[in-house]
Amino acid sequence: MATPGSHDRTTLSSPTRRSVLRAAAIGAGAVTLPSVLAACGSGSGAGGGGKTVTFGSNWSDPVPKQGVAKAVADFQKSQGYTVKTNTVDHNSFQQNINRYLQGNPDDVFGWFAGYRMQYFAQKGLLSDISDVWGNFTGFSDAIKAQSTGLDGKQYFVPFYYYPWAVFYRKSVFAQHGYQIPTTWDQYIALAKQMQKDGLVPISFSDKDGWPAMGTFDYINMRLNGYDFHKSLMAGHEDWTNPKVKSVFDTWRQLLPYYQQGALGLTWQESAQALQQKKTGMMTLGMFLGQQFGSDVSDLDFFAYPAIDPANGQDAVEAPIDGFLLSHKAKDPEAAKKFLTFLGTAKAENDYLSVDPTLLGVNSAVDTSGYTALQQSGAKLVSTAKSISQFMDRDSRPDFVSTVMIQALQTFLNSPSDVDGLCNSIQRQKTAIYATEG
Amino acid sequence: MRPKADLEPAVSTGPTATAASAAAPTEGRRRPRAERRRIRRLTTRDRIVITVLLGLPLLLTLVLVWATTLASIGLSFTNWDGIGSAKFIGVDNYKELFTNYPPFATAIWHNLLWLGFLALVATPLGLLFAVLLDRKIRFSRFYQSAIYLPVVLSLAVIGFISQLLFARDDGIVNTVLGTTGQGGHPVDWIGDPHINIWVVLVMAGWRHAGYVMVLYLAGLKGVDPSLKEAAAIDGANARQTFFRVVFPVMRPVNIIVGVITVIEALRAFDIVYAINGGTNGLELLSVLITDNIIGEASRIGFGSAIAVVLLLISVGCIVAYCMTELREEKK
């Protein structure tokens, strides 16, 4: 087994050994996972003098990993600090976050904005970084709100985001002469027209359990407004409220235009159907572009259509990823220096130069290298009145993962029994939210 | 050190000798005496070896099995999110589980269905394969390997294989059925919550039958051929020979196969987790435990309550099964 002292050398000399160890660790079970993974993560620290910051990175896919490494290298070079990066598989990191934070967490680690961050702040597992925020420039108020805990202090350094919208292929729309729908009626009419033209109107999949949440969030925000979405996700609203039922009722109008067998499809499969021009539209995050390969230049999107004119299209779902400071940071000053750097446009540009499917959060980010898709994404978010995260980031993780995944799949299977479904969600919600303030 | 060591065997010989003499009353008196002498001859080193060999597994069992089981039971009466301290809430988790958690009833039903399917379809099928292959038919080695092959694969891999076979639009099954083309109505094997459990059961049964076959092949090889000859001389036909003579003789294998079938049915997890995370028609108790305890949810008390229910079901099944088997043995 690689010990913390020897892992640098092990990693450099035999990368296969590391992957074997990681696989073994995943198999070995969740309880021991954080420490084992921490022991065999990839080290980038060169050792030597200067202050050291440990950094738990969940950017494990090759492209994001490289992007983060570039920003880290830039920090080390310009400020003379040493950053020891422990990269952990993205999903394992998420699964083990509770034990990780209570065990021996790294000083700085990657996480998500919104309630999912506020929850841990409330539990006292994060350090307040309001002083770091005092020096930040280029973040909008909406972004700052997403980085703020329930106690009004800042905990989160935002890095990038990816908006959700309705994606389509420009060439398909041009071929049939389709117009961009801005209202719900136009959207339905367009779907009908696509059906006539022999296309499956909407690519849709929910085998993974989470893609359907995006559609629920959007219909809810368009129908009932952003504030109601926040309040519903925070557990303050009753799920048997007619407002919630009307979300499902509205959603039901879309179901005839969905791809068949959606519950047996992953988002990748239905994104490929869009890419192969079998389907016309798809509601997903901008990462959808990953499935398009060289066709990505033909990919475009429009904002989710308005349902209630009072809300228009003013809210955008744009999950933000970024960094947190753990409550056990060994050298908080050095860690805050690192976080300060990560909040700059320079760090974001380092990352985006490697991964062009996302958007920088800082308004000072150099957008000259943006693709057309990135540019429209940036425009969409900058004109948004409010930014939501995502159902599983705006709400309690226990509620979403044990109640909402099943509930939305139940709705898709039997869309007619909305009353029974809402009652069931409400009962379970009451029980879960009763356990904790 | 020495006098103490002399004392110990004298104490421990008592029950062993009585047990031995009780078990073999017809074998005369020389046996127990010989045994006593042998145990007295144990050296300190022997004793250390025995202590280590028995004590270590005992300690591991206590810590890893009994302590964790008791901890689970204890936690099931608390509300704990994994951070801070647990709060005692009595039987609320169980109340919640039985009245207000829709996947729970589905999961119990699926686990029982799984058990029924393995016990009534897959296990008899494995026995049938074993009997056929035991007859030295042509290519029996080939069949044997082919049927045993899936056992080598992990259930997670079988989950991936079933997705290739049963995918709705480009799966092999639907392609062969010819329903994928324009205007066809392909069956949604994986996505339809009323069908997918059966697909998974077929795949799990495919693997289980191979496993059972190997166990019974070994069992059949161990049956004394003279028993079959005797049965034939007494005028028994093939079926009577098998059910009245061969099958009862294989009792030890039957017990093992029975226990394995129960265990396989109750610990089923990887195949459904690989397919769709154990949601949408593929709920199992093991998946619900994982969803609640591991991962961000951290409803540890609630998940432990599900684990306790699974424990009760497994203990109930195993105890009932072993009791009937042992009772028959006594007859």
Image (cartoon, coloured by chain):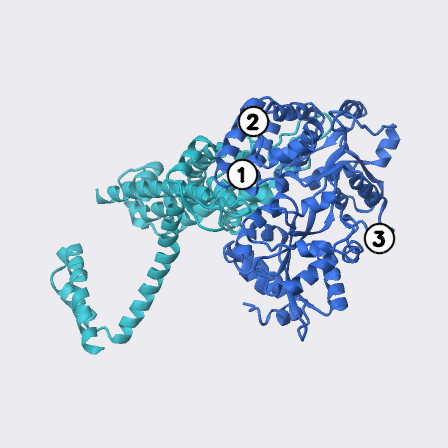
Chain colours: A blue, B cyan
Quarter of the image for residue B236 reads top left
Asked whether B233 or A329 is in front, the reply is A329
**Position in image of residue A168 (x %, y %):** 80, 35
Q: Are marks 1 and 3 on the same chain?
A: yes
Asked whether B246 or A430 is in front, the reply is A430
Q: Amino acid at mark 2?
A: Cys
Q: Is A193 positioned to the left or the right of B249 in the image?
A: right
The Cα–Cα distance between marks 1 and 3, rounded to whole angstroms, is 41 Å
Residue on which the image places disc 2: A422
For numbered disc 3, what is the local secondary structure? loop
The Cα–Cα distance between marks 3 and 2, rounded to whole angstroms, is 46 Å
Relative height, residue A300 to residue A199 (above, below): below
Residue on which the image places disc 1: A402
Q: Amino acid at mark 1?
A: Thr
Q: Is B93 positioned to the left or the right of B35 in the image?
A: right
Answer with mark 3 or mark 2, whichever residue precedes in sequence: 3
Relative height, residue A430 to residue A336 (above, below): above
Residue on which the image places disc 3: A366
Judged from this view, the residue extending furthest toward the left is B29
Q: Are marks 3 and 2 on the same chain?
A: yes
Q: Quadrant of the N terminus of chain A?
A: bottom right
Q: Nearer the viewer, mark 1 or mark 2?
A: 2
Labels 1 and 3 touching (C-beta < 8 A) = no
The residue sitting at 55% across, 46% down in the picture is B296
